[in-house]
């Protein structure tokens, strides 16, 4: 990872009062298709179509340029297909087309049983990206640990420089918000000439799907969502991260060897953080170019390693051993990672991820709660770094509290909530959306990227799409801890 990616969004509650019948929102785009041979990462080639259409970069700016939105459509294998299924990638910043090439490719193919499947590149991502990456001259020093007092002002200064750069390039960054992206989905529906779409999303993709429910409430057939990020949950509550670590400890305790090695993971982490805060560790190692790197690591970097490691059980299972090594003064396992992700390159921003998160924003009440909980929580407020630290930067404002209200819908929705997902949490999934046709499934030992974690998940999704009865819970194999 050569850049620090963030996330953002702009406007006011008034936006929700704007009618979709407004000419700026309702003009049906002309979608063009061309044959496309889609090659997955495993070498499989399938016939598909590459589609594209144009939308305003910012529908609230009459002078905004048009941008092209692209996607891949896999035609349904059914003789009587249902509503097209649109895959919404996470991030923000993930590419739907790129995701389809990876480990989820078999599930993309299986979903064709129910309708055309569309790997959608959201505005600012993949084939739909029209923002030049901004690399600044700012970088974090190697000879001193990162601190909040130094890093956040540097990040904000770099962000403002990038805002000026993108403006000079003709980019209207205010158009890269979740509402505009949801309107792109409705434009896709209109261009396809269909009444409804099925939305299939993960993480930020679930956030976008819930915004789409507000933008086009009568035009969604059903939803399949996991890694739920509610409209008010761009920044997660630190206390819920601590609750996740208790669930991780429960998984450790179920493994006799791991339980003996790590009887108190939270205590171990706090001990390491305290030591590094008092006495940072100097690490010397060789980078990929064969050059010797001398770098100082402190508490903040260690907390970031924790934040980066807990999305899925496989990576979280290595975290206790990493902390045990750090407690013994050995940071050799993590130093190259910290260097590659935080310290090697100048600070750079992609645009879309930062704008989406900033503009989805955080309410003042929630921010106060985050700040309060961060004082004592294991990872502080770093799970979504650099949010909320960059809130209102890049010259952007957030979408307002009206955008962040809970979604209530009668759209049939399957929600998968994983107990060992360290990025999005069970409490947030319940708060995000309510309705009479929601079926929630608890995935024991599941992670954030649960779709391909085990065959049972794909089978459950296919069963739900067929209208069959699905369980309220499913248990996957527990993680195997290193010790």
Image (cartoon, helix red, strand yellow):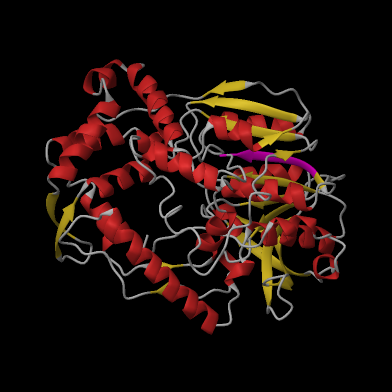
Residue 131 is covered by the magenta coloring: no
Residue 478 lies, with reference to residue 402, above or below; the image says: above
Query: Could you say which is closer to the camera, residue 149 or residue 303?
Result: 149
Query: Could you say which is closer to the camera, residue 383 or residue 471?
Result: 383
307 displayed left or right of 87: left
At a point 81% along the width and 44% down the height, the residue shown is: 78
**Residue bounds of the magenta highlight:** 221-227
Residue 233 lies, with reference to residue 145, above or below; the image says: above
Q: Position of residue 123 (x, y in %)?
A: 63, 65
Which image quarter is the C terminus in? top left
Give the overall secondary structure of the magenta segment.
strand
Q: Position of residue 414 (x, y in %)?
A: 69, 33
356 displayed left or right of 410: left
> Is residue 431 visible in the rendered structure shown here?
yes
> Is residue 458 visible in the rendered structure shown here?
no
At a point 38% along the width and 70% down the height, the residue shown is: 157
Task: Residue 478: name its quadrant.
Answer: top left
Q: Position of residue 117 (x, y in %)?
A: 72, 51
Extreme residue in the bottom direction? 168
Residue 457 lies, with reference to residue 345, above or below; the image says: above
16 displayed left or right of 7: right
Task: Residue 244: name its quadrant.
Answer: top left
At a point 65% along the width and 62% down the height, the residue shown is: 11
At a point 37% along the width and 60% down the height, the residue shown is: 1
Residue 269 lies, with reference to residue 298, above or below; the image says: above
471 displayed left or right of 26: left
**Count of residue discs:** 0
């Amino acid at each position: 990872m050569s850049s620090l990616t963030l996330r953002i969004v702009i406007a006011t509650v008034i936006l929700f009062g704007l009618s979709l019948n407004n000419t700026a929102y309702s003009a049906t785009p002309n979608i063009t298709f061309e044959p496309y041979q889609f090659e997955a990462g495993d070498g499989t080639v399938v016939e598909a179509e590459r589609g594209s259409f144009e939308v305003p970069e910012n529908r609230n700016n009459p002078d905004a340029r048009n941008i092209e939105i692209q996607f891949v459509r896999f035609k349904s294998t059914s003789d009587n297909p249902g509503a097209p299924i649109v895959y919404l990638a996470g991030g923000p910043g993930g590419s739907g087309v790129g995701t389809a090439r990876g480990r989820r490719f078999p599930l993309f193919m299986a979903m064709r049983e129910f309708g055309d499947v569309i790997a959608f590149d959201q505005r600012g991502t993949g084939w739909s990206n029209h923002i030049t990456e901004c690399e600044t001259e700012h970088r974090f020093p190697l000879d001193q640990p990162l601190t909040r007092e130094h890093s956040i002002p540097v990040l904000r200064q770099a962000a403002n420089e990038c805002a000026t750069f993108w403006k000079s390039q003709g980019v209207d960054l205010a158009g890269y918000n979740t509402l505009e992206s949801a309107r792109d989905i409705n434009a896709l529906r209109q261009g396809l000439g269909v009444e409804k779409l099925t939305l299939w999303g993960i993480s930020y993709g679930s956030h976008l799907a819930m915004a789409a429910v507000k933008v086009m409430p009568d035009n969604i057939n059903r939803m399949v969502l996991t890694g739920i990020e509610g409209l008010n949950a761009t920044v997660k509550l630190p206390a819920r991260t601590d609750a996740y670590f208790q669930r991780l400890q429960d998984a450790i305790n179920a493994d006799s060897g791991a339980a003996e090695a790590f009887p108190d993971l939270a205590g171990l982490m706090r001990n390491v953080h305290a030591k590094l805060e008092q006495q940072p560790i100097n690490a010397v190692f060789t980078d990929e170019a064969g050059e010797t790197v001398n770098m100082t690591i402190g508490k903040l970097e260690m907390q970031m390693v924790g934040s980066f490691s807990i999305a899925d059980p496989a990576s979280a299972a290595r975290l206790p051993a990493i902390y045990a090594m750090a407690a013994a003064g050995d940071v050799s396992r993590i130093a190259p990672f910290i260097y590659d992700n935080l310290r090697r390159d100048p600070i750079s921003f992609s645009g879309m991820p930062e704008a989406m998160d900033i503009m989805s924003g955080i309410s003042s009440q929630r921010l106060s709660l985050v700040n309060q909980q961060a004082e004592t929580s294991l990872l502080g407020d770093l799970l979504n770094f650099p949010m909320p630290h960059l809130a209102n930067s890049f010259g952007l404002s957030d979408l307002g509290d009206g955008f962040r209200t809970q979604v209530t819908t009668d759209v049939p929705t399957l929600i998968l909530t994983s107990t060992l997902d360290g990025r999005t949490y069970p409490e947030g999934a319940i708060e995000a959306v309510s309705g009479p046709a929601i079926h929630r499934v608890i995935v024991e030992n599941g992670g954030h990227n649960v779709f391909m974690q085990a065959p049972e998940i794909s089978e459950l999704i296919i069963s739900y799409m067929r209208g069959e009865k699905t369980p309220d819970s499913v248990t996957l194999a527990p993680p195997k801890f290193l010790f």
